[in-house]
Amino acid sequence: MKRFAKLFFAVCIVLVTTMPIIAHGVRINHSINASTGEVTITAAFDTGEVLDEAAVIIFAPDDLINPWSTGVMDETGTYAFTPDYTIEGFWDVQVRKAGHGGLINIEITEDMMPDSSSSAVSSDDNSNSTMITLSDGSEVLITGDVNFSVNGDTITFETASTDSTPQNSVTNQSSTSGFTTAQIVIMSASVIWGFIGTALYFTGRKPKSAT
Amino acid sequence: MHIPDGILTPEVVIGGYIAAGALTAYSLRKINQLPDPQASMPKAALMTAAFFVASWIHIPVPPTSVHLVLNGILGVVLGWYAVPAILVGLFLQAVMFQHGGLTTLGINATMMGIPALLAYGIFQLRHRLNLKSALSTNIFAFLGGAFGLGLAALIAFTILVTSIPTYIDVATEQAAITALTVAHIPLAIIEGIFTIFIISFLLRVRPDMVESHALTH
């Protein structure tokens, strides 16, 4: 028995440490673009193989029986939608293909709604310049890519952005399996060692129970 | 093969737990009736470890891919012990790696456990037919290992196809499930060959582990 256990343990260790980490767990991620309010879902197997053309079913918090919306992922395993921000709570998004898939919860609140934090006065969209007339009749011209708000005669400037790339993207990750290879190897080895220990324990007891 | 959470209706999930509970209770009772229930524990523990690791071993079958299951092998080698072994293995796979799911633990255990017992029955048929050659042992080992997986895949197919929600594209999902089930045919052959290797190895090292007749008691 011990010979069998040793051989088995050696085979398991070799398998766990050398095999690519591949299986049929599904990893689902989502990101929310704060400027547009769009939620983007991506789904892939642990192998990295994307769930292309997988069905996407979205449930709003106020009705978890009838889908709020359904759709199909594109060939890159991506799907985007804009939720109704007035329905606050945890939205369930299910991705499934051939009986495989997963479910994630995305918290949606009205605070996350686009434009909810816009300043009191906005700049001219095309020229990036704004003329403000104060209470004493004087005028202030503000130019450049800056955000500001006006309260009475007080102009408050906010941090400006000179970067043209989208910078308001809030990314949250929620996955069904997010372990690294090292973690998986350690976890698998721990479980295997537990089974080996169980086998050795009962091997040791065998002569006693036989008497 | 592992049905994840959120795919099945609550009725199927509850039914799966009832079936798995009954199957496990009956199997444990049968194990307890053996002259020495602890005698096969080392073998069961090691085979559960193999089952646990197997889902990480992935075999590409274009256009999809499948992973080893080993439920037929567990049935052939363990007999009644296969049911608790599969249940424990599935539980650990679900908790640690989210392969399968906790709500679907019952249905997955039933789906793999019943074919495992039938696989053992097939393997033991050689005694009833009085076939004692090494070749016949290998043939029945192959049939047991392959049938165990094949039947489990067929049960999974039936469960999945009959529980597709109407609000998704049913035809597309059916086609995808069918493709995945067909991909298990070569896997069944592979697991059948694995079963031959394991039985041959055990017969050389510890023949008493193979001839325990666990189901006949």
Image (cartoon, grey):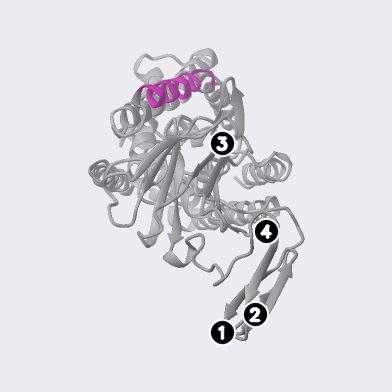
Image quadrant where one finds the N terminus of chain B: top left
Q: Nearer the viewer, mark 2 or mark 3?
A: 2
Q: Which residues are magenta?
A: B171-186
| Residue A145 point in image, percent of width and height | 73, 63
Q: Which residue is mark 4?
A: A167
User: What chain is tagged by disc 1?
Assistant: A
Q: Nearer the viewer, mark 2 or mark 4?
A: 2
Q: Secondary structure at mark 3?
A: loop
Separation of residues labelled 4 and 3 (CA atoms): 24 Å
In contact (CB < 8 Å): disc 1 and disc 3: no
User: What chain is tagged by disc 2?
Assistant: A
Question: Does residue B126 appear to the left or right of A154 in the view shown?
Answer: left
Q: Secondary structure at mark 4?
A: loop
Residue A170 in sight in this render:
yes
Q: Nearer the viewer, mark 1 or mark 3?
A: 1
Q: Are marks 1 and 3 on the same chain?
A: yes
Q: Are marks 4 and 3 on the same chain?
A: yes
Q: Secondary structure at mark 1?
A: loop
| Residue A50 point in image, percent of width and height | 59, 35
Mark closer to the chain start, 1 or 3:
3
Mark closer to the chain start, 1 or 4:
1
Q: Which picture quadrant has residue A154? A: bottom right
Q: Which residue is mark 1?
A: A152
Mark closer to the chain start, 4 or 3:
3
| Chief secondary structure of the magenta portion | helix
Separation of residues labelled 1 and 4 (CA atoms): 30 Å
In contact (CB < 8 Å): disc 4 and disc 3: no
